[in-house]
Image: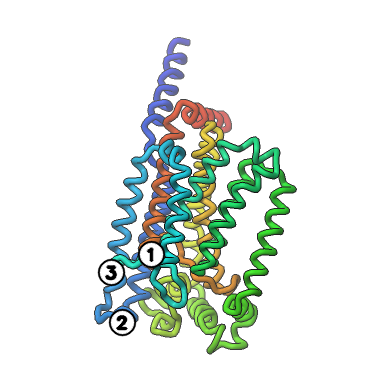
């Protein structure tokens, strides 16, 4: 009996030691690293021709993308060092900074392809809407913790964050940046739903958002043109449907296993934005169905881990961390879903990058910051007393099942 008791005590000590020493979610970091590597390889392949013509250097974009990857990893590592309580205390500061950045870009922003979304800083262009996504999610997470009962019981508590979203949406649509508006709106809706809002309120809000989106589409000729071009791109394949038809050709050429790395034809000035918004189509052409499915699986794993980290934090009664993780998971998931859907012709053409993969410094760095926040939430949750009890309970349950 003494031997059994000693063995049991030793096992408990080993479990506690193992849990106490956990610093990273290995699955999250592996999925992130794989996507960063895929992005670096695909940018090298997709941009080499256009970089040679535009810049006289075939490696211009891949070198810059590599620099962005390094900066993103550094930014993620810095964010990982910040306690989550600091994000919670800085809620109003995050909201204020978001609004200031969105107003600033309207005043001094740089216009590219008819949109004023960037602030020029020498050779770099900063896109404030990318950082705004993360800051607004942190603000809403804090609001839901402070006003959770009000959100669940009253219409006013439910409506206040929607007023914030409305102001942000107006500023984004003035750029215009309809894609960022949709992503932030989806994150707000998802976080409010997961916080326990009444289903009736949530359904009414979704209906209102759909009506507003429909109104914005029909009030803007270029958005309506994109919608009609999406429904039948081949009707005007050299006009409004050109980009989508070229993307679909890339998917068709890819077949099962692709034409091979570097052998894409569509990247040779047939498919516009081949290294940014439509890099997934080049990946489909060069690696086929197998490659695209693997990338989709990586994004599914990434979003799943984000939601599981949020669930672990919620069960440990760390509600701010939970809502923050849920919001980040929804941000990354919705943006990846929209980008992939646009590339495949399942959604109307919209200018959104593929997180961690597409060329674009602001998007890549902020995406890495999101991963840093998730890693920090996991670290703090698992190494808290409640987190250890939750994790140890799961280990014990798994042992009993076996």
Task: Residue 185: give x, y in percent of width and height.
Answer: 58, 57
Q: Earlier in the sequence, mark 1 or mark 2?
A: 1
CB atoms at circles 1 and 2 under 8 Å apart? Answer: no
Compared to residue 314, the image places residue 134 above or below, namely below
Seen in the picture, residue 227 relative to 5 is either above or below; the reply is: below
Residue 87 visible here: yes
**Quadrant in the rendering for residue 123:** bottom left
Measure the alpha-carbon separation of dots 2 and 3: 15 Å
For residue 219, side relative to residue 290 (left or right): right
Residue found farthest to the left: 57
The residue identified by callout 1 is: 39
Where does the image place residue 116, in percent across and percent down from the top left? 44, 70
Along the viewing direction, whichever of 113 and 19 lies nearer the viewer: 113
Q: Residues within 10 Å of mark 1 (few under 14, many from 20)?
A: many
Q: Nearer the viewer, residue 64 or 179?
A: 179
Q: Residues within 10 Å of mark 3 (few under 14, many from 20)?
A: few
Which residue in the structure is indicated by mark 2? Answer: 54
Q: Which is nearer the eye, 88 or 313?
A: 88
Alpha-carbon span between mark 1 and mark 2: 21 Å
Q: Is residue 64 visible?
A: no
Q: Are marks 2 and 3 in contact (CB under 8 Å)?
A: no
Residue at 68%, 56% (x, y): give it.
206
In this rendering, the label closer to the viewer, 3 or 1: 3
In this picture, is 153 found above or below 57? Answer: above
In the picture, the disc for residue 123 is 3
Q: Classify residue 227 as left or right of residue 115.
A: right
Residue 283 point in image, percent of width and height: 44, 71
Give the percent coordinates (x, y) of residue 280.
46, 70
């Amino acid at each position: 009996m003494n031997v059994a008791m000693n063995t049991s005590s030793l096992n408990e000590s080993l479990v506690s030691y193992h849990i106490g020493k956990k610093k990273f979610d290995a699955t999250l970091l592996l999925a992130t690293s794989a996507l960063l590597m895929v992005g670096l390889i695909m940018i090298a392949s997709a941009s080499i021709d256009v970089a040679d013509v535009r810049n006289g250097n075939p490696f211009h974009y891949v070198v810059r993308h590599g620099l962005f990857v390094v900066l993103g990893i550094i930014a993620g590592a810095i964010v990982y060092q910040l306690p989550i309580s600091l994000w919670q205390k800085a809620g109003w500061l995050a909201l204020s900074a978001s609004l200031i950045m969105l107003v600033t870009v309207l005043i001094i922003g740089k216009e590219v392809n008819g949109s004023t979304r960037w602030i020029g800083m020498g050779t770099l262009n900063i896109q404030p809407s990318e950082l705004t996504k993360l800051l607004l999610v942190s603000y809403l997470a804090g609001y839901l913790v402070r006003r959770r009962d009000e959100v669940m019981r009253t219409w006013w508590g439910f409506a206040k964050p929607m007023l914030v979203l409305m102001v942000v949406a107006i500023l984004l649509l003035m750029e215009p940046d309809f894609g960022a508006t949709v992503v932030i709106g989806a994150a707000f809706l998802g976080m409010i739903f997961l916080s326990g809002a009444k289903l009736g309120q949530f359904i009414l809000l979704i209906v209102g958002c759909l009506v507003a989106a429909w109104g914005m589409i029909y009030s803007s000729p270029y958005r309506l043109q994109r919608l009609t071009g999406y429904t039948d791109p081949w009707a005007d394949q050299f006009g409004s449907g050109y980009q989508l038809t070229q993307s679909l050709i890339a998917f068709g050429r890819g077949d099962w296993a692709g034409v091979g790395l570097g052998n894409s034809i569509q990247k040779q000035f047939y498919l516009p934005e081949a290294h940014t918004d439509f890099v997934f189509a080049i990946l489909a052409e060069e690696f086929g169905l197998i490659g695209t499915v693997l990338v989709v699986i990586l994004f599914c794993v990434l979003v799943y881990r984000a939601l599981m980290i949020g669930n672990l934090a919620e069960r440990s009664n760390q509600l701010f961390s939970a809502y923050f993780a849920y919001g980040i998971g929804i941000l990354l998931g919705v943006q990846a879903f929209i980008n992939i859907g646009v590339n495949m012709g399942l959604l109307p053409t919209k200018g959104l990058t593929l997180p961690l993969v597409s060329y674009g410094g602001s998007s890549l760095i902020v995406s890495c910051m999101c991963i840093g926040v998730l890693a920090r939430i996991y670290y703090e949750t698992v190494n808290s007393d409640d987190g250890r009890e939750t994790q140890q309970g799961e280990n014990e349950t798994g042992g009993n099942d076996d």
